[in-house]
């Protein structure tokens, strides 16, 4: 049985091998049994992943509600349809500046989008009732 190494080993290698992409380092460490991802428990991804799925669902719904296809959205953003698809599926995470660009492309103020999103993330419908999503 292989010994398991703490995730700090990854940080050590990533710091001292700056020319190698950290993803390749992680892959190599996992391949040779030096690093076990199951030991990396610093971040609870289940909560953020659930919230991010809700965010993506609402972003897609907003686009569809105004009648835009992914191709239309891509054109407005100056990107490809593949880019929009990857963003909507969560394959590529969006930062706040990109979310703002998506909202602008839909003619939707960012604040309006956030006001519609927040009750869904907090589990409440408008009027204070619990939402079971």
Image: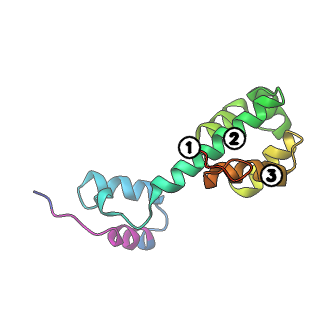
Quadrant of image for the N terminus:
bottom left
Q: What residue do we see at 64% from left, 38% from top?
A: 57
Residue 58 numbered mark, or none: 2
Asked whether the beta carbons under mark 2 and mark 3 sit within 8 Å of each other, the answer is no
Secondary structure under tag 1 reads loop
Pick whichever, 93 or 129, lies toward us: 129
- Tell me where residue 120 appears, x and y as whole percent: 65, 48
- Looking at marks 1 and 2 on the same chain, the residue that comes earlier in the sequence is marked by 2
56 relative to 118, above or below: above
Asked whether the beta carbons under mark 1 and mark 3 sit within 8 Å of each other, the answer is no
Judge depth for marks 1 and 2 and give the one in front. 1
- Looking at marks 2 and 3 on the same chain, the residue that comes earlier in the sequence is marked by 2
Residue 51 forms part of the magenta stretch: no
- Using residue 114 as the reference point, say whether residue 109 is left or right of it: right
Q: What residue do we see at 69% from left, 52% from top?
A: 119
State the residue position of label 3: 100
Q: Give the residues drawn in magenta, as a range.
A: 3-14
Secondary structure under tag 2 reads helix
- Tell me where residue 10 appears, x and y as whole percent: 37, 67
State the residue position of label 1: 132
Which residue ends up furthest to the right in the rendered image?
A: 107
**Badge 1, how many Cα within 10 Å: few under 14, some, many 20+?**
few
Q: What residue do we see at 83% from left, 55% from top?
A: 111
């Amino acid at each position: 049985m292989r010994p398991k190494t703490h995730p700090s080993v990854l940080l050590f290698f990533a710091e001292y091998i700056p020319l190698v992409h950290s993803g390749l380092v992680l892959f190599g460490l996992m391949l040779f049994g030096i690093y076990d991802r199951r030991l990396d428990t610093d971040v609870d991804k289940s909560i953020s992943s659930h919230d991010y799925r809700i965010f993506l669902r609402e972003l897609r719904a907003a686009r569809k509600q105004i009648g835009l296809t992914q191709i239309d959205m891509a054109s407005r953003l100056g990107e490809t349809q593949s880019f929009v698809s990857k963003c909507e599926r969560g394959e590529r995470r969006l930062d706040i500046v990109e979310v703002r660009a998506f909202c602008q492309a839909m003619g939707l103020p960012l604040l309006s989008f956030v006001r519609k999103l927040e009750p869904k993330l907090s589990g409440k419908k408008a009027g204070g009732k619990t939402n079971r999503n």
